[in-house]
Image (cartoon, grey):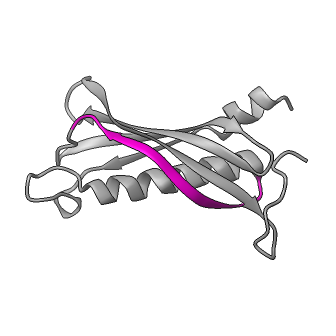
Amino acid sequence: MTLEQRIAQSETRIFKAVFPSTTNHYDTLFGGTAMQLMDETAFITATRFSRQRMVTVSSNRIDFEKPIPSGTIIELHGKVDYIGNTSLKVQVDIYIEQMYSEFREKAISGEFTFVAIDENKQPVAILK
């Protein structure tokens, strides 16, 4: 399998409904909840790409471009965008979809860095 095929095969899409229990007093998705969902999506993407133990080592800039209202559907999209020796980076975007229309727009984007580790929690090569 080529590197491009591995990247494509590891792309991850997760859909969630935004319910009032996940929103703040402005009736929009909590920023911390969005970041947790993004990290989880990035972890799944990194693991699907490497098929190894992966740990988050950093989240780079996260841009909150649009508020995500209650009563919408969100799509989290994760894609590997950099591969190093023991680390990789995953770009995660969150899109808002209205439940009862075709309207869709990007709301949040961020990048997460992961390191592959062995059973002793030591970094190991991603590409063997």
Q: Is residue 5 left or right of residue 90?
A: right
Residue 53 found in image quarter? bottom right
Total numbered badges shown on the rendered structure: 0
**Furthest residue in direction left, as rendered:** 25
In the rendered view, tell whether residue 63 sits above or below residue 29: above
Image coords of residue 123 (percent x, y) = 79, 62
> Residue 51 lies in what quarter of the image?
bottom right
Q: Which residues are magenta?
A: 51-66
Q: Nearer the viewer, residue 69 or 35?
A: 35
Task: Please say whether residue 45 is one of the residues in the magenta stretch.
Answer: no
Residue 116 lies, in percent from the top left, at 74, 58
Write the residue at 15% across / 59% down: 24
Give the left or right position of residue 62, taking residue 49 as reference.
left
View extreme (top): residue: 102
Locate residue 39, reporting x and y percent.
49, 55
Magenta stretch containing residue 63, yes or no? yes
Q: Tell me the quarter of the picture where residue 1 sits.
A: top right
Residue sitting at the far right: 128
Question: Residue at coordinates 67% horizontally, 40% vertically from top-left?
Answer: 10
**Along the horizontal axis of the image, is 115 left or right of 18?**
right
- Classified by dominant secondary structure, the portion drawn in magenta counts as strand
Residue at image point 64% right, 53% down: 114
Nearer to me, 14 or 43: 43
